Amino acid sequence: MSQLHLSDEILMAFADGELEEPTAAAIAKAMAEDPVVARRIMEFQQSRRLTRSALSDALSPDVPAHLRSAVSAQIRAYEAAAGSTSGPRVKASWSERLRSNQALGQWALAASVAAIALALGYFAGWWNRPEAHGLLAQLDSPILHRELDRTGSGQDVDLPFGRLRVISTYRVADGSLCREFRLHAPAEAAEAVACRDGEWKATFALATPVGQDAYVPSGGGDPTAAYLQTIGAGEPLAEEAEAKALAETSP
Amino acid sequence: MPAAIGQELVALLPRLRRFALVLCRSQPLADDLVQGACERALANAGSWTPGTKFDAWMFRILRNHWIDHLRRMKAEGMTEDVSLQTQLIGDPGEGPVLNRLVLSQVQRAIDSLPQEQREVLVLVCADDLSYREAAEVLGVPIGTVMSRLARARRRLMEMTDAA
Protein backbone atom coordinates (compact mmCIF):
# COMPACT_ATOMS: atom_id res chain seq x y z
CA MET A 1 0.00 0.00 0.00
CA SER A 2 1.27 3.44 -0.84
CA GLN A 3 2.10 5.55 2.15
CA LEU A 4 -0.70 7.90 3.07
CA HIS A 5 0.22 11.00 5.00
CA LEU A 6 -2.17 11.12 7.93
CA SER A 7 -2.48 14.88 8.16
CA ASP A 8 -4.95 16.56 10.47
CA GLU A 9 -6.96 17.62 7.44
CA ILE A 10 -7.31 14.08 6.14
CA LEU A 11 -8.27 12.61 9.51
CA MET A 12 -10.69 15.45 10.09
CA ALA A 13 -12.27 14.91 6.68
CA PHE A 14 -12.65 11.24 7.55
CA ALA A 15 -14.26 12.09 10.88
CA ASP A 16 -16.63 14.43 9.05
CA GLY A 17 -17.53 11.89 6.37
CA GLU A 18 -15.99 14.01 3.64
CA LEU A 19 -13.49 11.57 2.16
CA GLU A 20 -13.89 9.78 -1.14
CA GLU A 21 -12.99 6.15 -1.65
CA PRO A 22 -10.42 4.66 -1.72
CA THR A 23 -8.86 7.17 0.66
CA ALA A 24 -11.63 6.66 3.21
CA ALA A 25 -11.02 2.92 3.19
CA ALA A 26 -7.30 3.46 3.68
CA ILE A 27 -7.94 5.72 6.65
CA ALA A 28 -10.41 3.26 8.12
CA LYS A 29 -7.72 0.61 7.88
CA ALA A 30 -5.14 2.88 9.50
CA MET A 31 -7.63 3.67 12.24
CA ALA A 32 -8.32 0.01 12.92
CA GLU A 33 -4.61 -0.73 13.13
CA ASP A 34 -3.44 2.25 15.12
CA PRO A 35 -5.13 3.49 18.29
CA VAL A 36 -3.27 6.78 18.00
CA VAL A 37 -4.88 7.44 14.63
CA ALA A 38 -8.23 6.39 16.06
CA ARG A 39 -7.79 8.80 18.91
CA ARG A 40 -6.97 11.71 16.62
CA ILE A 41 -10.11 10.97 14.61
CA MET A 42 -12.19 10.74 17.75
CA GLU A 43 -10.86 14.10 18.86
CA PHE A 44 -12.11 15.69 15.68
CA GLN A 45 -15.49 14.21 16.40
CA GLN A 46 -15.29 15.40 19.96
CA SER A 47 -14.42 18.93 18.86
CA ARG A 48 -17.46 18.94 16.63
CA ARG A 49 -19.67 17.84 19.47
CA LEU A 50 -18.22 20.42 21.83
CA THR A 51 -18.72 23.18 19.28
CA ARG A 52 -22.25 22.09 18.73
CA SER A 53 -23.03 22.11 22.41
CA ALA A 54 -21.38 25.44 23.04
CA LEU A 55 -23.18 27.04 20.11
CA SER A 56 -26.37 25.12 20.49
CA ASP A 57 -28.88 26.60 18.15
CA ALA A 58 -31.90 26.19 20.36
CA LEU A 59 -32.14 29.94 20.33
CA SER A 60 -35.58 30.35 18.83
CA PRO A 61 -37.09 31.97 21.90
CA ASP A 62 -34.31 34.51 21.78
CA VAL A 63 -35.15 35.92 18.36
CA PRO A 64 -36.29 39.40 19.31
CA ALA A 65 -39.91 40.21 18.51
CA HIS A 66 -38.98 43.25 16.42
CA LEU A 67 -36.77 41.17 14.14
CA ARG A 68 -39.28 38.38 13.85
CA SER A 69 -42.11 40.72 12.97
CA ALA A 70 -39.97 42.74 10.56
CA VAL A 71 -39.02 39.59 8.69
CA SER A 72 -42.58 38.33 8.76
CA ALA A 73 -43.76 41.61 7.29
CA GLN A 74 -41.18 41.33 4.53
CA ILE A 75 -42.32 37.80 3.83
CA ARG A 76 -45.95 38.83 3.57
CA ALA A 77 -44.97 41.65 1.25
CA TYR A 78 -43.03 39.35 -1.04
CA GLU A 79 -45.15 36.27 -0.91
CA ALA A 80 -48.56 37.12 -2.16
CA ALA A 81 -48.62 33.77 -3.85
CA ALA A 82 -49.38 30.82 -1.64
CA GLY A 83 -46.33 28.86 -0.63
CA SER A 84 -46.00 25.23 -1.45
CA THR A 85 -44.79 22.97 1.26
CA SER A 86 -44.23 19.35 0.57
CA GLY A 87 -45.87 16.92 2.93
CA PRO A 88 -43.83 14.65 5.14
CA ARG A 89 -42.44 11.56 3.47
CA VAL A 90 -42.95 8.14 4.92
CA LYS A 91 -39.75 6.97 6.51
CA ALA A 92 -38.41 3.89 8.15
CA SER A 93 -38.48 4.06 11.92
CA TRP A 94 -34.77 4.64 12.37
CA SER A 95 -34.76 7.36 9.78
CA GLU A 96 -37.51 9.19 11.64
CA ARG A 97 -35.01 9.43 14.42
CA LEU A 98 -32.50 11.19 12.24
CA ARG A 99 -33.15 14.86 12.04
CA SER A 100 -34.25 15.70 8.56
CA ASN A 101 -31.61 18.32 7.95
CA GLN A 102 -28.62 16.14 8.66
CA ALA A 103 -25.89 15.46 6.21
CA LEU A 104 -26.63 11.77 6.31
CA GLY A 105 -23.31 10.70 4.92
CA GLN A 106 -21.55 12.36 7.80
CA TRP A 107 -23.86 10.70 10.22
CA ALA A 108 -23.39 7.31 8.83
CA LEU A 109 -19.67 7.72 8.99
CA ALA A 110 -19.76 8.99 12.51
CA ALA A 111 -21.64 5.86 13.40
CA SER A 112 -19.13 3.61 11.72
CA VAL A 113 -16.30 5.42 13.47
CA ALA A 114 -18.08 4.69 16.72
CA ALA A 115 -18.42 1.05 15.71
CA ILE A 116 -14.73 0.73 14.92
CA ALA A 117 -13.90 2.55 18.11
CA LEU A 118 -15.95 -0.07 19.90
CA ALA A 119 -13.94 -2.80 18.26
CA LEU A 120 -10.82 -1.10 19.53
CA GLY A 121 -12.22 -0.90 23.02
CA TYR A 122 -11.82 2.80 22.54
CA PHE A 123 -14.71 4.03 24.59
CA ALA A 124 -13.52 2.23 27.61
CA GLY A 125 -10.56 4.54 27.74
CA TRP A 126 -12.34 7.57 26.42
CA TRP A 127 -13.87 8.65 29.68
CA ASN A 128 -11.14 7.32 31.82
CA ARG A 129 -13.58 5.63 34.11
CA PRO A 130 -12.76 2.29 35.61
CA GLU A 131 -16.33 1.06 35.37
CA ALA A 132 -16.62 2.03 31.71
CA HIS A 133 -15.77 -1.56 30.96
CA GLY A 134 -18.99 -2.56 32.64
CA LEU A 135 -21.76 -2.91 30.11
CA LEU A 136 -19.57 -2.94 27.02
CA ALA A 137 -17.71 -5.88 28.51
CA GLN A 138 -21.03 -7.72 28.78
CA LEU A 139 -21.78 -7.58 25.06
CA ASP A 140 -20.11 -10.96 24.62
CA SER A 141 -22.01 -12.53 27.47
CA PRO A 142 -23.69 -15.87 26.60
CA ILE A 143 -26.60 -14.88 28.84
CA LEU A 144 -27.21 -11.82 26.70
CA HIS A 145 -26.90 -13.84 23.48
CA ARG A 146 -29.43 -16.35 24.71
CA GLU A 147 -31.93 -13.56 25.31
CA LEU A 148 -31.23 -12.01 21.91
CA ASP A 149 -32.20 -15.39 20.42
CA ARG A 150 -35.60 -15.49 22.08
CA THR A 151 -36.73 -12.18 23.55
CA GLY A 152 -39.32 -10.37 21.47
CA SER A 153 -38.87 -6.72 20.66
CA GLY A 154 -40.33 -4.35 23.20
CA GLN A 155 -39.72 -6.74 26.07
CA ASP A 156 -37.58 -6.24 29.16
CA VAL A 157 -35.47 -8.94 30.74
CA ASP A 158 -33.47 -8.68 33.95
CA LEU A 159 -29.94 -9.97 33.54
CA PRO A 160 -27.27 -10.28 36.25
CA PHE A 161 -25.51 -7.15 35.03
CA GLY A 162 -28.54 -5.03 34.25
CA ARG A 163 -31.85 -4.80 32.48
CA LEU A 164 -32.10 -5.66 28.80
CA ARG A 165 -34.67 -4.09 26.56
CA VAL A 166 -34.83 -5.29 22.98
CA ILE A 167 -35.90 -2.45 20.71
CA SER A 168 -36.26 -3.99 17.27
CA THR A 169 -35.04 -6.52 14.76
CA TYR A 170 -33.79 -5.83 11.24
CA ARG A 171 -32.78 -7.79 8.20
CA VAL A 172 -29.85 -5.74 6.97
CA ALA A 173 -28.42 -5.22 3.49
CA ASP A 174 -26.08 -8.21 3.61
CA GLY A 175 -28.91 -10.51 4.67
CA SER A 176 -27.87 -10.95 8.27
CA LEU A 177 -30.23 -10.53 11.18
CA CYS A 178 -29.48 -7.68 13.57
CA ARG A 179 -31.15 -6.53 16.76
CA GLU A 180 -31.07 -3.16 18.41
CA PHE A 181 -31.22 -3.23 22.19
CA ARG A 182 -30.45 -1.26 25.33
CA LEU A 183 -28.85 -2.25 28.59
CA HIS A 184 -29.46 -0.39 31.82
CA ALA A 185 -27.27 -0.77 34.88
CA PRO A 186 -27.26 1.49 37.93
CA ALA A 187 -24.16 3.38 36.82
CA GLU A 188 -24.46 3.35 33.05
CA ALA A 189 -26.68 2.64 30.12
CA ALA A 190 -25.70 1.34 26.72
CA GLU A 191 -27.37 1.15 23.35
CA ALA A 192 -26.12 -1.47 20.99
CA VAL A 193 -26.70 -3.39 17.80
CA ALA A 194 -25.73 -7.04 17.50
CA CYS A 195 -25.86 -9.16 14.36
CA ARG A 196 -26.11 -12.94 14.18
CA ASP A 197 -23.52 -14.72 12.14
CA GLY A 198 -23.51 -18.17 13.68
CA GLU A 199 -23.51 -16.35 16.98
CA TRP A 200 -24.40 -12.86 18.12
CA LYS A 201 -21.72 -10.23 17.73
CA ALA A 202 -22.08 -6.65 18.88
CA THR A 203 -21.32 -4.46 15.89
CA PHE A 204 -22.14 -1.14 17.46
CA ALA A 205 -22.42 0.11 21.01
CA LEU A 206 -22.43 3.30 22.97
CA ALA A 207 -22.20 3.30 26.71
CA THR A 208 -23.22 6.37 28.65
CA PRO A 209 -22.75 7.03 32.33
CA VAL A 210 -26.18 7.43 33.86
CA GLY A 211 -27.16 11.04 34.28
CA GLN A 212 -25.02 12.54 31.53
CA ASP A 213 -24.65 12.39 27.81
CA ALA A 214 -21.25 11.02 27.07
CA TYR A 215 -20.66 10.71 23.40
CA VAL A 216 -22.63 12.10 20.52
CA PRO A 217 -21.08 12.06 17.08
CA SER A 218 -21.25 14.88 14.59
CA GLY A 219 -24.84 15.84 14.19
CA GLY A 220 -25.51 15.35 17.84
CA GLY A 221 -28.65 13.27 17.60
CA ASP A 222 -29.11 9.55 17.32
CA PRO A 223 -25.94 7.62 16.49
CA THR A 224 -27.66 4.26 16.69
CA ALA A 225 -30.17 5.28 14.06
CA ALA A 226 -27.32 6.53 11.91
CA TYR A 227 -25.53 3.24 12.32
CA LEU A 228 -28.64 1.28 11.36
CA GLN A 229 -28.78 3.35 8.23
CA THR A 230 -25.15 2.56 7.50
CA ILE A 231 -25.73 -1.16 7.52
CA GLY A 232 -28.85 -0.89 5.39
CA ALA A 233 -31.42 -1.82 8.01
CA GLY A 234 -34.82 -1.55 6.38
CA GLU A 235 -38.11 -1.54 8.23
CA PRO A 236 -38.05 -3.34 11.57
CA LEU A 237 -39.50 -6.85 11.30
CA ALA A 238 -43.06 -7.17 12.55
CA GLU A 239 -43.80 -9.66 15.35
CA GLU A 240 -44.44 -12.75 13.26
CA ALA A 241 -41.60 -12.11 10.87
CA GLU A 242 -39.32 -11.44 13.80
CA ALA A 243 -40.23 -14.67 15.59
CA LYS A 244 -39.66 -16.59 12.37
CA ALA A 245 -36.32 -14.98 11.72
CA LEU A 246 -35.15 -15.56 15.29
CA ALA A 247 -36.16 -19.23 15.08
CA GLU A 248 -34.04 -19.84 11.97
CA THR A 249 -31.15 -22.04 12.88
CA SER A 250 -28.00 -20.27 11.89
CA PRO A 251 -25.95 -21.91 9.12
CA MET B 1 -42.72 30.93 -9.97
CA PRO B 2 -40.17 31.46 -7.20
CA ALA B 3 -40.35 29.06 -4.31
CA ALA B 4 -42.04 30.22 -1.12
CA ILE B 5 -39.14 30.59 1.25
CA GLY B 6 -40.89 32.47 4.04
CA GLN B 7 -41.33 29.52 6.37
CA GLU B 8 -37.79 28.34 5.91
CA LEU B 9 -36.54 31.83 6.51
CA VAL B 10 -38.34 32.18 9.83
CA ALA B 11 -37.14 28.76 10.92
CA LEU B 12 -33.59 29.74 10.08
CA LEU B 13 -33.61 33.04 12.00
CA PRO B 14 -31.85 31.75 15.14
CA ARG B 15 -29.00 30.27 13.11
CA LEU B 16 -28.77 33.36 10.91
CA ARG B 17 -28.43 35.49 14.03
CA ARG B 18 -25.73 33.23 15.35
CA PHE B 19 -23.73 33.42 12.15
CA ALA B 20 -24.25 37.18 11.91
CA LEU B 21 -22.93 37.52 15.44
CA VAL B 22 -19.84 35.55 14.51
CA LEU B 23 -19.31 37.93 11.60
CA CYS B 24 -19.84 41.26 13.31
CA ARG B 25 -19.65 40.60 17.07
CA SER B 26 -22.38 43.06 17.90
CA GLN B 27 -25.90 41.87 18.59
CA PRO B 28 -27.82 44.95 17.39
CA LEU B 29 -25.78 45.04 14.21
CA ALA B 30 -26.23 41.28 13.78
CA ASP B 31 -30.00 41.68 13.90
CA ASP B 32 -29.88 44.48 11.31
CA LEU B 33 -27.75 42.28 9.12
CA VAL B 34 -30.17 39.39 9.39
CA GLN B 35 -33.08 41.63 8.51
CA GLY B 36 -31.27 43.06 5.51
CA ALA B 37 -30.22 39.61 4.35
CA CYS B 38 -33.80 38.36 4.60
CA GLU B 39 -34.98 41.27 2.49
CA ARG B 40 -32.33 40.46 -0.08
CA ALA B 41 -33.21 36.77 -0.07
CA LEU B 42 -36.91 37.45 -0.57
CA ALA B 43 -36.17 39.79 -3.45
CA ASN B 44 -34.03 37.09 -5.02
CA ALA B 45 -36.06 34.04 -4.05
CA GLY B 46 -36.07 33.06 -7.70
CA SER B 47 -32.34 32.44 -7.60
CA TRP B 48 -32.64 29.73 -4.97
CA THR B 49 -33.06 26.27 -6.45
CA PRO B 50 -35.48 24.19 -4.39
CA GLY B 51 -33.80 20.96 -3.40
CA THR B 52 -30.48 22.65 -2.74
CA LYS B 53 -29.52 23.59 0.77
CA PHE B 54 -31.46 26.63 1.77
CA ASP B 55 -29.32 27.39 4.79
CA ALA B 56 -26.09 27.47 2.79
CA TRP B 57 -27.71 29.78 0.23
CA MET B 58 -28.92 32.03 3.02
CA PHE B 59 -25.57 32.11 4.85
CA ARG B 60 -23.90 33.24 1.65
CA ILE B 61 -26.42 36.05 1.20
CA LEU B 62 -25.89 37.10 4.81
CA ARG B 63 -22.13 37.13 4.48
CA ASN B 64 -22.19 39.07 1.20
CA HIS B 65 -24.55 41.52 2.82
CA TRP B 66 -22.04 41.95 5.64
CA ILE B 67 -19.17 42.51 3.23
CA ASP B 68 -21.21 45.11 1.34
CA HIS B 69 -21.96 46.77 4.65
CA LEU B 70 -18.23 46.94 5.47
CA ARG B 71 -17.48 48.42 2.06
CA ARG B 72 -20.18 51.02 2.50
CA MET B 73 -18.84 52.00 5.89
CA LYS B 74 -15.37 52.31 4.50
CA ALA B 75 -16.68 54.51 1.72
CA GLU B 76 -18.50 56.69 4.22
CA GLY B 77 -15.40 56.91 6.38
CA MET B 78 -17.18 55.47 9.41
CA THR B 79 -15.48 53.26 11.88
CA GLU B 80 -17.04 50.21 13.36
CA ASP B 81 -17.73 49.93 17.01
CA VAL B 82 -16.74 46.43 17.93
CA SER B 83 -16.19 47.15 21.58
CA LEU B 84 -19.33 45.20 22.35
CA GLN B 85 -18.08 41.82 23.41
CA THR B 86 -20.76 39.28 22.82
CA GLN B 87 -21.24 36.12 24.78
CA LEU B 88 -22.00 32.94 22.96
CA ILE B 89 -24.82 31.31 24.80
CA GLY B 90 -24.96 27.55 25.01
CA ASP B 91 -28.19 25.85 25.78
CA PRO B 92 -27.85 22.85 28.04
CA GLY B 93 -31.32 21.75 26.95
CA GLU B 94 -30.08 20.56 23.59
CA GLY B 95 -27.50 17.95 22.89
CA PRO B 96 -25.17 16.52 25.45
CA VAL B 97 -25.09 18.21 28.79
CA LEU B 98 -21.49 19.10 29.30
CA ASN B 99 -20.53 20.31 32.66
CA ARG B 100 -20.75 24.08 32.87
CA LEU B 101 -17.05 24.46 33.30
CA VAL B 102 -16.23 22.63 30.09
CA LEU B 103 -18.99 24.43 28.24
CA SER B 104 -17.73 27.85 29.23
CA GLN B 105 -14.19 26.78 28.40
CA VAL B 106 -15.33 25.80 24.93
CA GLN B 107 -17.21 29.06 24.50
CA ARG B 108 -14.17 31.06 25.53
CA ALA B 109 -11.98 29.00 23.24
CA ILE B 110 -14.31 29.62 20.28
CA ASP B 111 -14.43 33.32 21.12
CA SER B 112 -10.66 33.48 21.13
CA LEU B 113 -10.26 31.98 17.66
CA PRO B 114 -9.41 34.23 14.75
CA GLN B 115 -12.45 35.40 12.82
CA GLU B 116 -11.70 33.25 9.77
CA GLN B 117 -11.49 30.12 11.92
CA ARG B 118 -14.63 30.93 13.89
CA GLU B 119 -16.83 31.36 10.88
CA VAL B 120 -15.79 28.11 9.27
CA LEU B 121 -16.11 26.27 12.60
CA VAL B 122 -19.65 27.52 13.06
CA LEU B 123 -20.71 26.72 9.51
CA VAL B 124 -19.36 23.18 9.52
CA CYS B 125 -19.66 22.03 13.12
CA ALA B 126 -22.75 23.91 14.29
CA ASP B 127 -24.66 24.30 11.03
CA ASP B 128 -23.58 21.01 9.44
CA LEU B 129 -22.52 22.47 6.12
CA SER B 130 -20.23 20.30 4.02
CA TYR B 131 -16.73 21.57 3.28
CA ARG B 132 -17.80 22.44 -0.24
CA GLU B 133 -20.85 24.35 0.95
CA ALA B 134 -18.78 26.24 3.50
CA ALA B 135 -16.22 27.05 0.82
CA GLU B 136 -18.99 28.50 -1.34
CA VAL B 137 -20.39 30.58 1.51
CA LEU B 138 -16.96 31.95 2.36
CA GLY B 139 -15.74 32.28 -1.20
CA VAL B 140 -12.48 30.38 -0.56
CA PRO B 141 -11.05 27.10 -1.90
CA ILE B 142 -12.00 23.89 -0.12
CA GLY B 143 -8.40 23.37 0.99
CA THR B 144 -8.54 26.67 2.84
CA VAL B 145 -11.73 25.60 4.59
CA MET B 146 -10.05 22.38 5.68
CA SER B 147 -6.87 23.92 7.01
CA ARG B 148 -8.72 26.65 8.94
CA LEU B 149 -11.18 24.15 10.31
CA ALA B 150 -8.54 21.65 11.41
CA ARG B 151 -6.59 24.40 13.14
CA ALA B 152 -9.69 25.68 14.90
CA ARG B 153 -10.64 22.23 16.15
CA ARG B 154 -7.15 21.41 17.33
CA ARG B 155 -7.02 24.61 19.32
CA LEU B 156 -10.40 23.88 20.77
CA MET B 157 -9.25 20.49 22.01
CA GLU B 158 -6.05 21.97 23.38
CA MET B 159 -7.93 24.64 25.27
CA THR B 160 -10.55 22.48 26.93
CA ASP B 161 -10.44 19.79 29.57
CA ALA B 162 -13.01 17.68 27.81
CA ALA B 163 -10.41 16.13 25.54
Image (cartoon, coloured by chain):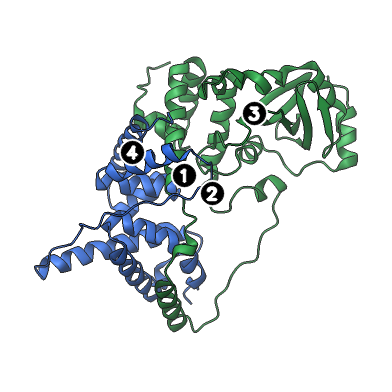
Chain colours: A green, B blue
- The outermost residue toward the left is B77
Number of other residues with Cα within 10 Å of mark 1, as a class: few under 14, some 14 to 19, many 20 or more: many
Q: Which residue is drawn at the image coordinates 41% and 79% (left, top)? A: A74
- Badge 4 element: helix
The residues tagged by marks 1 and 2 sit, at their Cα atoms, a distance apart of 7 Å
The residues tagged by marks 1 and 3 sit, at their Cα atoms, a distance apart of 22 Å
The residues tagged by marks 3 and 4 sit, at their Cα atoms, a distance apart of 30 Å
Callouts 1 and 2 in the same chain: no
Q: Which residue is mark 1?
A: A53
For the residue marked with disc 1, what is the amino acid? Ser
Are circles 1 and 2 on residues that touch, CB within 8 Å?
yes
**Image mark for residue B146:** 4
For the residue marked with disc 3, what is the amino acid? Ala
- Badge 1 element: helix
- Give how far across and how far down residue B111 sits, in percent: 30, 45
Callouts 3 and 2 in the same chain: no
